[in-house]
Image (tube, rainbow, N blue to C red):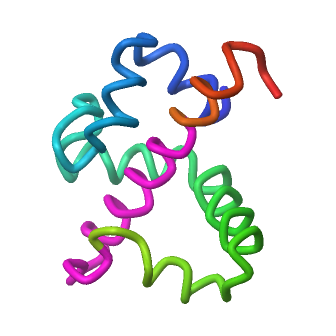
Amino acid sequence: MNMKEYIKETYTLYELEAIIQLGCAKGAAFKQANYEATELFHDKFEVDVWGLIDSRAETAEMEFFQFIGNLKGSEEVGGIDQFKRLLCWFAIEETAREIINGGQEDE
């Protein structure tokens, strides 16, 4: 199972809308709200997470780590657990947006 499939199976459309509107930092992605859960998510879907970041950085015409440095909440990262949380939440929010904006069909 890839990251997008996992998110589709884990959250309802209503919950995905909340993730888009409120963001993960506000607790909308309640199944990935604590450090343990975000680290597990990152580690399980690491290739998907980093691929999404790479794609978004390219679209924004930014260097990879420059893009990460511009993510909301990046200024609060002080360790690896916070870094993984930042990437996890970004990936969940972006994937939720893809699912909602692109419908329920796989791309």
Q: Residue at x 29, y 33 (%)?
A: 29
- Tell me if 75 is positioned left or right of 66 in this view: left
Q: Residue at x 63, y 34 (%)?
A: 98
User: Vertical placement of 77 versus 25: above or below?
Assistant: below
Instruction: Locate the C terminus and report the quarter of the image it occupies.
Output: top right
Q: Nearer the viewer, residue 87 or 58?
A: 58
Q: Nearer the viewer, residue 88 or 98?
A: 98
- Tell me if 55 is positioned left or right of 15 in this view: right
Percent across and percent down for residue 93 are: 45, 43
Q: Residue at x 55, y 79 (%)?
A: 67
Percent across and percent down for residue 57 are: 67, 73
Q: Is residue 58 magenta?
A: no
Percent across and percent down for residue 104 are: 67, 13
Part of the protein shown in magenta: 74-95
- Tell me if 16 is positioned left or right of 23 in this view: right
Residue placed furthest toward the right: 107
User: Vertical placement of 55 versus 17: above or below?
Assistant: below
The tally of labels here is 0
Q: Is residue 92 magenta?
A: yes
- The answer to which image quadrant residue 73 occupies is bottom left
Main SS of the magenta part reads helix
- The answer to which image quadrant residue 76 occupies is bottom left
User: Vertical placement of 16 versus 66: above or below?
Assistant: above
Q: Nearer the viewer, residue 31 or 99?
A: 99
- The answer to which image quadrant residue 87 occupies is bottom left
Instruction: Locate the N terminus and report the quarter of the image it occupies.
Output: top right
Q: Nearer the viewer, residue 33 or 16?
A: 16
Q: Residue at x 34, y 71 (%)?
A: 83
User: Vertical placement of 82 versus 35: above or below?
Assistant: below
